[in-house]
Image (cartoon, coloured by chain):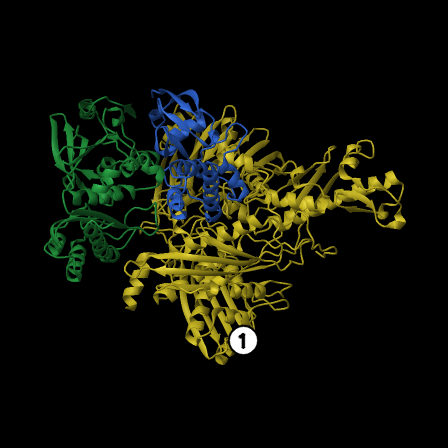
Chain colours: A green, B yellow, C blue
C-alpha cells in the first residue's frame, strides 16, 4: 500500500487519477482502517487529505451559510456552539456516529463517501440541503449530498475526484432540523433506521420541509411524499400520521442481522414523527 | 471435608483493601497475553475455513513456504502421533480436532493451517498464500434442525452410551434425572402451564483476545506464556497434542483479560508450539476479535420445553423440563447441567428433567459462567412467573413457599446441606426495590438462580521470609481480584498485615497440578488451601516457639500473629511475634513454609435472586433496564467489593444475553456478526447502577464459610428481564435475545 | 515494501520509529515503542481498550495509522501517573475495585481523564455516554462510573 499526504486537493486529485488498483482517501479513517484491519479492502493507494490547508476549518460565510473542511471531526462540530445552534440535527447526526473516540476522528465526508445506506450524518445532511465541492482532474464542481451515494459502498464520484469542502446552507428564519435513529443499544451501533427532518414555518404552519430516511433502502431516500404530508400543516396528528405512512411506504429495506423489513418499515414511520416534532419545536424556537 | 475449627470473628476477612496488582493494572505495566515478546520471536497466523462444513480435499502450502518472510507452516499432519503417546482419545482428540481441522472443516472459522513469519503483517499476508481445496458439505447450525431426521451428520459415532437408540447421530449425550411421579403431580395441580423457549448462543466476550508465546525445541522441552484460566490444563493438553512429556513444558499464565469460562481450554497454544518446533524460534500468536468470535467457544444455544403444575396456594405439584443444547461440532453442550440446575431452587415432590447434547456446524462451545444454567432458568422462571400471574400470587412468596432448604432432596439428586435460598428470598422481599412504586410503562420481574460451584484439584504453597513477610503461591489465575482474597485469608491465619503478603500465580513448574479458575472455585478452593497452608506454617512457627521456650508444642498456640503459651499452666512467656521467629529460622531448623494440596469437595451450592425494573418503548420494542438489584448468598464475603463486582458483572452479562447478544448465522452457515459493532454487549450507557445485597449463610465446607460467587449471578437475569418485559408490555417473550424487532413483532401480534 | 520514518512525541518524550503504512498507531506503540499499556481488544474502534489522546483529542489508536502520528503529541496510559504519584483517577479505580481483570482499565483511564479535563462536573449520564466506547465485560460499569464521578468530585473540591 502506498501512502501519500498531498498538500492540495489538486495534488490529491492528480494522485488518485494516476493511481492503479484500489484508491482510498483518508480523512478520519474510522471506516478505512476497519476495512484494512479486517482485510476487507486493502487500498493500493491511500491518500491522506489531512495535510491540506484549511481541511479542519469551520467557517460561517457572510450570507449565514457554513463551509466545513473535509477533515472536520464530529467532536469539533459538537464543540462549535453556533453551528450547533443553526443545525442541531446535522451536528447531532454526526455526533451519533461511534464512540467519543470515534468522534475524535470521524468526518461528515468520510461518513458519506463510505457509501453505507445507514450512515447517520447523510439523512441529516440531505434534509438540510448540504452540498459539496468536488475537486477532480478537470477542476471543481458542486454536488448535492443526495447525488453522491449510488448503492451500498458505491458513490457517483469519478476516478480522481475528491470531496474538498462541505457547504451547509444558511439556517434562515423559523427553521429547525432534527435527526433520530434507531439502534438496539444506546450507543455504538449502526442505525437500523435513521430519519432526518428539516423544516421551516410561517407562524405555526410548515412552509418548507425535507425528510430523508436512512438504512431503509440501498441509498438514503429524500422522500417527497413525507414533505408533502406535513407542508401546510401545523404538524397536527393527522399530518403526523400521514408523515408516518409516507415514510413507511417509501421504505425498501432488507432483512439482515440488524433488523427486519417489517421492523424497519414500521419504525421509519415512528421516527419520522418523533424527528418532525423535534424539528418543529426547534423551528418555533423551543428548546428541544 | 469436615471442619473442626469454624471461624466467625475476623480481623482481615471482610475488609476492602486495595488489590495487590492494582498499581500494575492502572499504570499499563501489567503483562497480559499479547504483551510478552522474546528474542528472535516470530508471529503466527492461522488460516480458517470459510465454510460451515466441508471436506478438506487438499492443502497446498508451497507458495506460503516459499515466501521470504515465512519460517514455518503447519497443518494437521504436524500434530502426528509420536511413539510414547500413541493416539489421542476423548477430549484431547476433540481439542486437537478443534485446534487444527483433520479431514473436515466443521464450522466457519475452523483452523486448517498456520504459518509463522518474521512480522505480524508478513504473517497476515503470507497466510493467504496457502491454498485449500474444499468439498462443501451440507451444514446445520440450529439445534432443533440438527436433531431432525434429515440433518447432515457432523460426525458418525460421536455419541456415547447414554444416548437412546433411534436418536439422530448428532445427539451425542443424554441425561435424565428426577424423582417422584410427575404425571401424578400434574393431576394434583390447579393450573398446569407448558411452554417452549429458545435461547441463542452468546459469547463470553472477554475484552482480551486469546494470545500466547510458545517455544518448543527438538529436545521436547518447551515454554509457553498464555492468557488462560488454567495453565496446568494448557500444559497437559498441549503436551498431549504435541506428543511431549507434560513436565517438559513449563506454562506461565499471563495476566488474564477476562475469561468467564472461555479460557479454560486451548486454541492457539498448541499451534504456536508446533510452529516453534518447526521454525526453532519462539512464536507468538494473537487472535483478532473476529477469530475470537468465529473460532472460540461461545455458549450453547438451547431449545427447551417446560411444564409446571401449581396449586392455587402456590405449591408446585410437579415440574418437567426437556432441554436441548447445541454446543458446536463437538460433544460438550451442557444439556445435563441445564437439566440439573433448572429446578434446583425448589423443594419438589415430583420432578423430571431431560438434557440433550447436540452437535451442529458451529464452533466448539466453551464454558460460560454457570454453563447451561441460565437457559434453563430462563424457561423455568418464566413459566413460574406466568403461573403466579394467572393465580394472582406474589412471585417471591411463591418461591419462598417452594424454596429448597437444608435437608431438601435436590431436583438433581443429592440432599442439600446448609444453603441460603430462603434467606436470600427474604432479603429480596425486604429490599426497598421490591416495594418501590413503578413508573407508568415499567414492569418488575424477579427470578431465582442456582449454581453448583466446584472444588477441584488445588495446591498452594506459602513461604515465610526472614523479615516476617509471606509469599503465597497459588495456581489459579486471578480473574477478578482473587490475589486480594488469598492475601486476606493468609493474613487472617498468620496474623500479619495484608500488605506484608505477596500472592503470586505460580507457573506449572513451581506447584503441583491446579484445576482451572472455573466453577466459582478460586476463593473457595485456593482460599481453603491458602488457609490450610498458612496453618501448616503456623504449626512450624509454634514448634520453633515451643523449642525456644522448652515446652511441649501442644502448649503453644497462635494468636494475633504471635506464638503464646496456650494457658497459664504452659508457662509465662511473652508473646513471640512471627517476625522474631522467622528472623532466626535459619539457625532454629531452617526455612519455614506451609503447603496444602487436596481436591476439596465441600464447595457449597449458591442461590441468587434478581429484581429488575424494565420499560419497553411500545412503538419500537426497545427495552431499557431502569433499576437492577442482585441478592445472592456468598457464604462469607472475603473481599466484599470483589464479591459485589462478581454480582454486577454477572448481571450485566445476563442483561446482554437477554436483550441483544446472539450468534447470527446466515443461510450459508457463516457467522455474520463477528465484531463488537454487531455482537452487541452492553455499553456503559445501557445499564443502570447495579445494586447488590450480599447474604451470608456460611458454607459448612469452608473454614470461613466461603461459597463461590462468580457464576450464579448470570443465571437469574434472563428470566428476570423477560418477566419484567412481560409485566411492562404484556407480552411473554419465549425467545432470546428479546431484541426490538422480536418485541415489536410480539406487540403487533398481541395488539 | 517501503517503510516510513515517523518522529513523534509520546508522553512528553520524542520518539522515532519505522513503520509500514498499514500499521496502526496501536501497532507502533506496542510493537515498536514497547508501550504495551494500550490494548487491542477489537481492532475496529468498538472497544476503546486502545484509547490514547493525540494532540489532546481522545481517539482509538487502532483507528489511526502510525504514519499519521508524525509531529503529534500522544499521551498513553503510561503517562497518566506523575512519576510515582498516581493520578487521582488511578487511585480511585483501585479503591473502588473498579477493575476486575484490568484489560479495559488503561483505555478507561485515558478516556475518563479526557472527560474530566473537558467536563469537571459530569452527570452520571454524561459519564456513561462518554465511556460508551470503552467496553468492560467484568464490572457492569457500576464501580467504574462511581470511581470516575467520585474523582471528579474530589478534583472539584481540591481546585
The chain holding disc 1 is B
Query: Is residue B360 in sight in this rendering?
Result: yes
User: Which residue is at 41% across, 69% downward?
Assistant: B195
For the residue labelled by badge 1, is the local secondary structure a helix, a strand or a loop?
A: loop
Image quarter of residue C42: top left
Seen in the picture, residue B727 relative to A45 is either above or below; the reply is: below
- Classify residue B321 as left or right of residue A38: right
Q: Residue C134: x percent and y percent?
A: 41, 41
Q: Residue B262: x percent and y percent?
A: 49, 46
Which quadrant is the N terminus of chain B positioned in? bottom right
The residue where tag 1 is placed is: B181
- Classify residue B513 as left or right of residue A59: right
Query: Is residue C137 in sight in this rendering?
Result: no
Seen in the picture, residue B641 relative to C48 is either above or below; the reply is: below
Q: Dot 1: few (<14), some (14–19), or many (≥20) neighbours within 10 Å?
A: some
Q: In terms of depth relative to the viewer, which is nearer, B667 or A280?
A: A280
Q: In terms of depth relative to the viewer, which is nearer, B57 or B293?
A: B293
Q: How many numbered marks have been drawn onto this rendered protein structure?
A: 1
Q: In terms of depth relative to the viewer, which is nearer, B218 or B659?
A: B659
Q: Residue B313: x percent and y percent?
A: 50, 78
Which quadrant is the C terminus of chain B positioned in? bottom left
Seen in the picture, residue B156 relative to B222 is either above or below; the reply is: below
User: Which residue is at 23% across, 44% downward?
Assistant: A88
Q: Residue B676: x percent and y percent?
A: 38, 44
- Classify residue B749 as left or right of residue C13: left
Amino acid at each position: 500500500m502506498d501512502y501519500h499526504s498531498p498538500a492540495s486537493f489538486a495534488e490529491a486529485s492528480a494522485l488518485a487519477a494516476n493511481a492503479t488498483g484500489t484508491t482510498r482517501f483518508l480523512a478520519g479513517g474510522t471506516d478505512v482502517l476497519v476495512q484494512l484491519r479486517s482485510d476487507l479492502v486493502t487500498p493500493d493507494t491511500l491518500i491522506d487529505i489531512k495535510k491540506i490547508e484549511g481541511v479542519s476549518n469551520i467557517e460561517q460565510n457572510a450570507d449565514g451559510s457554513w463551509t466545513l473542511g473535509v477533515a472536520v471531526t464530529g467532536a469539533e462540530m459538537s464543540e462549535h456552539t453556533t453551528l450547533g445552534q443553526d443545525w442541531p440535527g446535522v451536528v447531532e447526526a454526526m455526533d451519533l456516529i461511534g464512540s467519543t473516540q470515534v468522534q475524535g476522528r470521524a468526518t461528515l465526508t468520510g461518513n458519506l463517501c463510505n457509501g453505507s445506506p445507514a450512515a447517520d450524518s447523510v439523512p441529516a445532511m440531505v434534509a438540510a440541503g448540504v452540498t459539496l465541492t468536488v475537486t477532480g482532474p478537470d477542476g471543481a464542481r458542486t454536488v448535492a449530498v443526495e447525488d453522491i451515494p449510488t448503492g451500498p459502498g458505491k458513490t457517483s464520484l469519478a476516478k480522481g475526484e475528491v470531496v474538498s469542502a462541505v457547504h451547509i446552507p444558511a439556517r434562515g428564519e423559523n427553521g429547525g432540523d432534527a435527526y433520530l435513529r434507531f439502534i438496539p443499544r444506546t450507543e455504538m451501533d449502526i442505525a437500523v433506521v435513521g430519519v432526518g427532518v428539516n423544516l421551516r414555518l410561517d407562524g405555526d404552519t410548515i412552509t418548507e420541509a425535507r425528510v430523508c430516511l436512512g438504512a431503509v433502502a440501498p441509498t438514503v431516500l429524500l422522500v417527497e411524499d413525507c414533505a408533502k404530508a406535513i407542508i401546510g400543516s401545523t404538524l397536527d396528528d393527522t399530518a403526523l400520521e400521514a408523515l408516518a405512512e409516507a415514510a413507511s411506504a417509501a421504505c425498501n429495506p432488507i432483512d439482515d442481522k440488524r433488523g427486519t423489513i417489517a421492523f424497519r418499515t414500521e419504525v421509519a414511520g415512528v421516527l419520522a414523527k418523533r424527528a418532525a416534532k423535534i424539528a418543529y419545536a426547534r423551528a418555533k424556537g423551543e428548546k428541544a | 471435608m469436615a471442619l473442626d475449627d469454624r471461624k466467625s470473628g475476623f480481623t482481615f476477612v471482610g475488609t476492602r483493601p486495595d488489590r495487590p496488582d492494582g498499581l500494575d493494572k492502572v499504570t499499563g505495566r501489567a503483562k497480559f497475553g499479547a504483551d510478552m515478546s522474546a528474542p528472535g520471536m516470530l508471529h503466527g497466523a492461522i488460516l480458517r475455513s470459510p465454510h460451515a462444513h466441508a471436506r478438506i480435499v487438499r492443502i497446498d502450502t508451497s507458495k506460503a513456504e516459499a515466501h521470504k518472510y515465512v519460517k514455518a507452516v503447519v497443518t494437521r499432519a504436524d500434530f502426528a502421533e509420536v511413539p510414547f503417546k500413541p493416539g489421542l482419545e476423548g477430549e484431547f482428540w476433540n481439542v486437537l480436532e478443534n485446534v487444527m481441522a483433520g479431514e473436515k472443516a466443521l464450522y466457519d472459522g475452523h483452523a486448517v493451517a498456520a504459518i509463522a513469519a518474521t512480522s505480524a503483517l508478513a504473517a497476515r499476508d503470507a497466510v493467504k498464500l496457502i491454498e485449500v481445496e474444499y468439498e462443501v458439505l451440507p451444514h446445520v447450525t440450529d439445534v432443533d434442525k440438527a436433531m431432525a431426521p434429515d440433518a447432515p451428520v457432523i460426525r458418525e459415532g460421536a455419541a456415547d452410551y447414554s444416548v437412546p437408540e433411534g436418536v439422530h447421530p448428532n445427539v451425542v449425550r443424554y441425561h435424565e434425572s428426577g424423582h417422584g411421579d410427575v404425571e401424578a403431580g400434574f393431576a394434583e395441580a390447579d393450573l398446569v402451564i407448558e411452554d417452549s423457549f429458545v435461547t441463542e448462543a452468546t459469547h463470553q466476550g472477554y475484552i482480551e483476545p486469546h494470545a500466547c508465546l510458545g517455544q518448543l525445541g527438538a529436545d521436547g522441552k518447551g515454554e509457553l506464556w498464555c492468557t488462560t484460566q488454567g495453565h496446568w490444563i494448557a500444559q497437559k493438553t498441549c503436551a498431549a497434542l504435541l506428543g511431549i512429556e507434560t513436565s517438559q513444558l513449563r506454562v506461565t499464565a499471563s495476566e488474564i483479560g477476562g475469561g468467564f469460562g472461555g479460557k479454560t481450554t486451548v486454541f492457539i497454544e498448541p499451534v504456536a508450539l508446533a510452529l516453534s518446533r518447526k521454525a526453532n524460534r519462539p512464536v507468538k500468536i494473537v487472535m483478532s476479535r473476529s477469530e475470537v468470535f468465529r473460532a472460540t467457544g461461545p455458549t450453547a444455544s438451547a431449545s427447551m420445553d417446560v411444564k409446571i403444575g401449581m396449586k392455587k396456594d402456590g405449591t408446585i405439584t410437579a415440574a418437567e423440563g426437556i432441554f436441548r443444547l447445541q454446543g458446536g461440532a463437538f460433544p460438550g453442550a451442557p444439556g445435563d447441567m441445564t437439566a440439573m440446575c433448572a429446578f434446583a431452587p425448589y423443594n419438589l415432590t415430583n420432578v423430571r428433567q431431560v438434557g440433550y447434547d447436540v452437535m451442529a456446524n458451529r464452533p466448539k462451545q466453551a464454558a460460560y459462567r454457570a454453563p447451561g444454567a441460565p437457559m434453563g432458568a430462563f424457561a423455568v422462571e418464566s413459566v413460574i412467573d406466568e403461573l403466579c400471574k394467572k393465580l394472582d400470587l406474589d412471585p417471591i412468596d411463591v418461591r419462598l413457599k417452594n424454596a429448597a432448604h437444608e435437608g431438601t432432596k435436590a431436583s438433581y439428586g443429592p440432599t442439600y446441606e446448609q444453603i441460603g435460598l430462603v434467606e436470600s428470598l427474604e432479603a429480596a422481599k425486604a429490599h426497598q426495590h421490591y416495594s418501590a412504586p413503578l413508573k407508568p410503562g415499567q414492569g418488575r420481574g424477579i427470578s431465582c438462580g442456582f449454581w453448583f460451584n466446584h472444588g477441584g484439584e488445588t495446591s498452594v504453597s506459602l513461604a515465610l521470609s526472614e523479615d516476617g513477610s509471606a509469599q503465597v503461591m497459588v495456581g489459579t489465575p486471578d480473574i477478578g481480584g482473587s490475589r486480594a482474597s488469598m492475601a486476606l485469608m493468609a493474613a487472617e491465619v498468620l496474623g500479619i498485615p495484608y500488605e506484608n503478603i505477596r500472592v503470586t500465580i505460580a507457573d506449572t513448574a513451581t506447584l503441583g497440578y491446579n484445576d482451572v479458575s472455573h466453577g466459582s472455585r478460586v476463593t473457595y478452593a485456593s482460599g481453603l488451601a491458602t488457609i490450610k497452608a498458612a496453618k501448616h506454617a503456623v504449626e512450624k512457627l509454634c514448634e520453633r516457639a515451643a523449642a525456644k521456650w522448652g515446652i511441649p508444642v501442644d502448649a503453644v498456640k497462635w494468636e494475633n500473629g504471635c506464638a503464646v503459651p496456650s494457658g497459664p499452666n504452659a508457662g509465662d512467656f511473652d508473646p513471640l511475634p512471627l517476625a522474631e521467629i522467622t528472623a532466626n529460622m535459619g539457625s532454629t531448623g531452617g526455612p519455614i513454609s506451609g503447603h496444602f494440596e487436596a481436591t476439596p469437595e465441600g464447595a457449597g451450592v449458591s442461590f441468587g435472586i434478581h429484581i429488575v425494573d424494565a420499560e419497553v418503548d411500545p412503538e419500537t420494542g426497545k427495552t431499557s433496564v431502569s433499576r437492577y438489584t442482585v441478592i445472592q448468598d456468598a457464604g462469607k464475603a472475603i473481599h466484599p467489593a470483589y464479591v459485589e463486582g462478581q454480582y454486577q458483572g454477572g448481571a450485566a452479562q445476563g442483561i446482554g444475553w437477554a436483550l441483544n447478544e446472539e450468534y447470527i448465522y446466515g443461510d450459508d452457515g457463516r457467522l455474520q456478526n463477528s465484531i463488537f459493532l454487531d455482537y452487541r454487549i452492553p455499553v456503559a450507557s445501557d445499564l443502570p447502577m447495579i445494586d447488590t445485597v450480599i447474604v451470608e449463610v456460611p458454607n459448612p465446607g469452608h473454614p470461613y464459610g466461603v461459597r463461590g460467587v462468580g457464576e450464579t449471578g448470570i443465571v437469574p437475569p434472563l428470566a428476570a428481564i423477560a418477566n419484567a418485559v412481560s409485566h411492562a408490555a404484556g407480552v411473554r417473550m419465549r425467545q432470546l435475545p428479546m431484541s426490538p424487532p422480536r418485541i415489536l413483532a410480539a406487540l403487533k401480534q398481541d395488539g | 515494501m517501503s517503510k516510513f520514518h515517523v518522529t513523534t512525541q509520546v508522553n512528553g518524550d520524542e520518539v522515532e520509529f519505522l513503520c509500514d503504512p498499514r500499521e496502526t498507531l496501536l501497532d507502533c506503540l506496542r510493537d515498536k515503542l514497547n508501550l504495551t499499556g494500550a490494548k487491542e481488544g477489537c481492532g475496529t474502534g468498538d472497544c476503546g481498550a486502545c484509547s490514547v489522546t493525540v494532540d489532546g483529542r481522545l481517539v482509538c489508536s487502532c483507528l489511526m495509522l502510525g504514519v499519521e502520528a508524525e509531529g503529534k503529541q500522544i499521551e498513553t496510559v503510561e503517562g497518566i501517573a506523575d512519576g510515582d504519584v498516581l493520578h487521582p483517577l488511578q487511585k480511585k479505580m483501585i479503591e473502588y475495585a473498579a477493575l476486575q481483570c484490568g484489560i479495559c482499565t488503561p483505555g478507561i483511564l485515558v478516556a475518563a481523564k479526557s472527560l474530566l479535563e473537558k467536563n469537571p462536573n459530569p452527570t452520571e449520564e454524561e459519564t456513561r455516554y462518554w465511556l460508551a466506547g470503552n467496553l468492560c465485560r467484568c464490572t457492569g460499569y457500576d464501580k467504574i462510573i462511581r470511581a470516575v464521578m467520585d474523582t471528579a468530585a474530589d478534583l472539584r473540591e481540591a481546585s
